[in-house]
Structures are given as C-alpha cells and as structure tokens.
Image: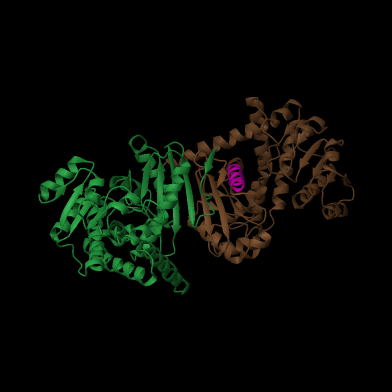
Chain colours: A green, B brown
C-alpha cells in the first residue's frame, strides 16, 4: 500500500507504462507525455528512488520537460522519459537491461530511449540487442558519443542571443561569466567563452574538474562556492550543475544581468521567472538553451552526422532570440514565452497529420 | 490525490499501461499479467468505476485470471485485460474507441483485446480500424460471433467430468441440476442438460429470460430466488450469473454434491474451496470449465472455424478430469490443483522458447 500522488489518468500524459520482470529485478516506468510531433524521446534514469510514487513523480515531470524541449528545438519528436528503480551499482545487469529493452520494444517505436543519470552508452548497447528504438549508443555501434560538446555549444549560442538582447551585440567579449559546475558541459562552455573574449569565473565541488579547467585555461578565476560565484562581479551567471540553482536568494544578490546555463530545471520554484524579470535579469530558459544534447542523440535517428547536428544546435541562437522577442511582445517572462512557443508548435505542427498523405 | 491500493511494481504483472486521450475522454488501463505462453488476450471492460484505484484493482485481478484460464485451456496465449473508465452509455464514441485502438496497437501485439462487460462486437470493429490485435469482431468482419454457445458447451463438458468423478458415468442423465442465471450461456446450458436427460431447476432476476427458457423447455422448473434454488433438492449447482456465488451459506445449506457453472470468480472468498471439499462437494473450477468463450475468440486468430473451436472446447472434459485427478493425487481441492496445472504449463511450455529456432 502506498499513497500514489499523481492520479495517473488525471495528468496530461498520453501513456504511462509500468514494466516488471521479477527474475532480473527490473522495475521500470516509461512515461510518454506527448507524441504530437513524433515519437517520444528521452533518457532512461537508473536511480534508487525512495518509493514508486517518487519515481512516478519524477518520470512524469521529466517526460513533460522533454516534450517542451523537443518542440522548442524544432525537432520532430515528442516527449518521453523512463526510470528504472534501484541502485545501478548493484542491480544493473545485462539481463535487466535487456528485459527493459524488450519492454521498450513492445511500445513499437512510440518511445525512443537514451542515456540519463545512471545509464551509459554501453548500457544502451545492451538495450539495443532487444530493441530498435535506442539512441545514445557507443560510437562503435553508430552512436553519437559524448553529448556534452553540443550541449555546451548550444548554451553558448543561447548566451550570445542573451548578450545581443542586453548589450546589442551577440558576443560575450569583454564580459564576465560565472560558470557554476565545470564537469564535461561546463568545461566545454568555458572554452567557448574564453575564445569569445570573456573573463570567466568558475566553481565546482569536485577539485579535479577545477584543476582540469585551470590547466587548460590559466586565466580563469576559481572561487570556493556557488554563493561566492553568484555574488562576484559577474555579468552572466551560467548554472551548469544541479537543478534548482535559481533561488530567491540568487535573484536578490547576484549582480548578473543574464542567467543562461546548461542545468535542467533551474528555476527553484514557480514564479521565480517573474522575480528575475522584475529585477531586470534576462533569463534564457534552461530547456531552450540546453537542447544541444537532445539534438545530438536525435540526429542518430538519421545516422549520426556531427556537422548536421552542430548546424541544428547553432539554431539555438535564433530560437533563444525568438523566445526573447515573444516575451517582449506578450509582456511575459522568457520562461513563459518559451512554453507558449513550444505549445504552439505542438498544436500547429501536430495538427498537420490531419492532412492525409498515402 | 488518491490512495493507490496495488503497488503496481510489486504485483506479478509484466506490464500495466495507463492510456489517456483528453479530447475523447479516454482513460484506459491495460494490464498484461503474463506472456509466458504467448500474447496476452482478454476483453476490454467499459465501466464507470468509482475510482482509478478500483479500476486498477479490477484489471489486475482479471488479467491474472486470464493467464490461468488460457494456460489451463491449453492455448498459446498469455493473460491480459483492459478497462475503460466511464459510463459507456454516455462516453462511448467512435473517436474514443479508435483512440483506445491506437494504444492497443502501440503494444505491438503483446495484447489482444476482445469484448467484455460494456463492449460489443461493433465496438471491436471500431477499435480494429486503428489496430491489428482485436478479436470478438462482428461475423461480417471475420469474428466468431456470439461466444455463449461454446461457453455453455464447455461448462457442460466440465459438468460431465464432475459427474463421472462423482457417480462413475459422464452423464447428468437422471440427476437434478440447478442453473442460477439463464441469460445466453445459462439458456444454452439448460438445452445440453435437457438433452442429456437431466431434470433442471432455474432461477433468474430477469423474467423475460425465464420466459424464454420455459417456452423452449416446458419441463424445466422455475424457482423464485437463488437461495431457493441452492437449497432445493438438486444434485448439481451451476452458478451462471454474478461472481461470488459460492458463499459460506451456500456451502452449508446446499444438498448439491457438485458445483459447476459458467460464472467467473465463483468463490466468494479465499479458503472456501477447502470448505467445499470438507463438505464433500466437488467443485469444478470456474476458469477451467468456462473457457469455451476464450477458446472461441482465440480461434479467430487463425481465421475462425466453429468446428475447430468446438473440438477444442470439448477438450474441457479431459482438462476437468485432469484437474480432479491432480487434486486427488496432491490431496488438495480442485481449485488449487487447477492453479498448479496452469502454473506448471506456463513454466514448462513457456521455457521452450529457450530452445532457439531461426
């Protein structure tokens, strides 16, 4: 017996699939939020949730986010996500992954999976032995490989659009950017910023990541905490670590006039997008600027081409521009404008299937 | 917010699928209990459940029952069931049925649907316009038509096996059989019994059903209630209406020495199979003897042949015999023996897929 928070048939999701294979220990939930624009794509998170209800809550939220991300990125994809409940360190086996693959296969292409927290390209290769609907595979198996390159590239494009909206020119040259989190994506972002002529301040909880950045870019300044970074003399704040980075305290204390980073779900609570706007801070919506990774794995569906994927990711500049323009036009914060643009595309382009073709 | 009784990933079910289409009002849950023997087959129940939790509870129980029924009937099918939540009188539309059909299609043949409470062959025709995995269609569309004929025939075969086990001869000739519920199945059962030389007592809450029976078989005796029927001088009690017909009161008061009928889930609570055995009443397990309808719709998958389906349904005689023999051998009530035979077949025949064929 467990209290079951989201009434599964009261959500806006099209389909939620519980998958169970006792012998392998597989307990998975696949959520398909929308297929208005195409098959749902989203990663499989392998995580020791405290309860099934927590897992369901997470997969419903994440899959909804994927619909909006794919729609705004201009992809012909819907939004989906999956969670496997348990500790990947002890539970992950070839058998479990392949059992999961059979359930993904059973959805007949309505859901494509990919890597997420706790799953890696090698895991996708196992899943793909039972299933045709897998992205994020190893390069040897036709996968796109490390998606941090284009994620960082896309965030940089979004930041250029924010710079243009703020200072008139699409460049970070001469500005100071604070990057919180210099794992793979943050590291690549620092490179783009340095090459563009920006001053960069970084922080990370993991010393080796900081060491690698300083080794490659000695001019980068390191500070001891995110609080210190946020309140330093920065023009742009780029959250590239955990979600919930934009708190009321950040909005009140940072001198930054732009927030644009790679982290997911940056807004710590609903309404904070309004607080940002009221303080004159331009927020480039997270799922708008961090869609480079999705663009990359989506490209695998056509047979991966880095050039083509990079060209699509460079479109994040125009998309972010369009979000800011719509925000101005509608008199709403950019986060709201982005949602509206995504919803409009799902509705308008989704409707086109009504024009019959044989 | 709703308390959610069955922890969906703690059940033994392989897959539970929540399907939602806002514009048409579709809220459906498809449960696949087991595919050890083949694709899951089971009807779609369209019913105004008081809550989603009630609907889930029902679909989990019903789909489990289908696994056992198909396994014991010797079919190459697993067990599944679906529920559509709502009042079919007001909610059922072509659009809703076709939206549902697309979700059934999305399971790629792991689940075949059929008629159940609140759905009819004409509904299956609508579903089949979006879906390849539909049985129970209208005759004009290749369906098997009314499944009550073979359901009744199968129950009669099971009753013959019970008569043999009790009196030494597989006939009801000279015995008195009480049939509670003379809708379509009960009516056909009365015909078999009369032709076999039995005396028949019937009851029903619906007068027109009684009128039809008496018109065709004037020798049949009508009584006013199920209580009256159960305590009349009958040798065999055949529950052919609602589930839960075998209560403690029935076990204590009936003079019948055989219980064998068409109703589903006859045992009102767990343990009552033991009470029946202790009072010397031979119980022919419900899902063992009432599988004629499933056998009929399953036959559609090969292109329906009434002769072939009837031949399979006549096998219910041997199956019921085997259940009684296993019960004697293991020293358990027939209901337990039937479960064990079904489970053994799922395990043993299911295992054969491990022998690779190209």
The location of residue B175, given as percent across then percent down, is 84, 37
How many numbered badges does the structure rendering display? 0
Q: Indicate whether residue A176 is drawn in magenta.
A: no
Q: Is any atom of residue B356 visible in this view?
A: no
Residue A151 visible within the image: yes
Magenta stretch: includes residue B55? yes
Q: Position of residue A189 (x, y in %)?
A: 20, 55
Magenta segment boundaries in residue numbering: B53-64
> In which quadrant of the rendered image does the N terminus of chain A lie?
top right
Residue shown at the point (89%, 47%) measured from the top left = B219
Left or right of A178 on screen, residue B141: right
Seen from the viewer's position, the closer of residues A257 and B44 is A257
Q: Position of residue B288 (x, y in %)?
A: 66, 40
Could you say which quadrant of the image residue B22 lies in?
Answer: bottom right
* Magenta stretch, main secondary structure class: helix
Q: Quadrant of the C terminus of chain A?
A: bottom left
| In the rendered image, the vertical position of residue A195 relative to residue A44, given as above or below | below
Q: Position of residue A309 (x, y in %)?
A: 25, 62
Q: Is residue A39 left or right of residue A317?
A: right
């Amino acid at each position: 017996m467990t209290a079951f928070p989201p009434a599964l048939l009261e959500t806006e999701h099209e389909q939620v699939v519980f998958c169970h294979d006792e012998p392998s220990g597989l307990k998975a939930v696949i959520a398909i939020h929308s297929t208005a624009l195409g098959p749902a794509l989203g990663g499989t998170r392998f995580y020791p949730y405290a309860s099934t209800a927590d897992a369901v809550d997470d997969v419903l939220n994440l899959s909804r986010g994927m619909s909006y991300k794919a729609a705004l990125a201009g992809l012909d994809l819907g939004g989906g996500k999956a969670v496997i409940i348990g500790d990947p360190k002890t539970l992950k086996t070839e058998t479990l992954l392949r059992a999961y693959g059979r359930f993904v296969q059973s959805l007949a292409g309505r859901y494509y999976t990919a890597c997420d927290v706790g799953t890696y390209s090698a895991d996708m290769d196992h899943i793909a032995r039972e299933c045709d609907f897998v992205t994020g595979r190893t390069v040897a198996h036709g996968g796109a490989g490390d998606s941090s390159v284009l994620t960082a590239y896309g965030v940089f494009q979004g930041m250029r659009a924010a710079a243009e909206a703020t200072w008139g020119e699409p460049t970070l040259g001469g500005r100071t950017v604070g990057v919180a989190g210099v794992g793979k994506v943050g590291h690549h972002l620092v490179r783009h910023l340095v090459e563009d002529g920006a001053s960069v301040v970084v922080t990370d909880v993991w010393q080796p990541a900081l060491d690698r950045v300083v080794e490659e870019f000695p001019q980068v300044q390191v500070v001891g905490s995110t609080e210190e970074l946020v309140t330093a003399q920065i023009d742009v704040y780029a959250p590239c670590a955990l979600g919930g980075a934009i708190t009321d305290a950040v909005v009140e204390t940072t001198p930054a006039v732009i927030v644009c980073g790679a982290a997911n779900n940056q807004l710590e609570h609903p309404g904070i997008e309004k607080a940002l706007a009221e303080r004159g801070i331009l927020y480039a919506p997270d799922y708008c600027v961090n869609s480079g990774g999705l663009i990359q794995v989506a490209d695998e569906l056509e047979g991966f081409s880095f050039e083509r994927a990079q060209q699509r990711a460079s479109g994040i500049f125009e998309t972010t521009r369009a979000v800011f323009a719509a925000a101005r036009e509608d008199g709403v914060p950019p986060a709201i404008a982005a949602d509206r643009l995504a919803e409009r595309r799902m509705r308008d382009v989704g409707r086109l299937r009504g024009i019959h073709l044989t």
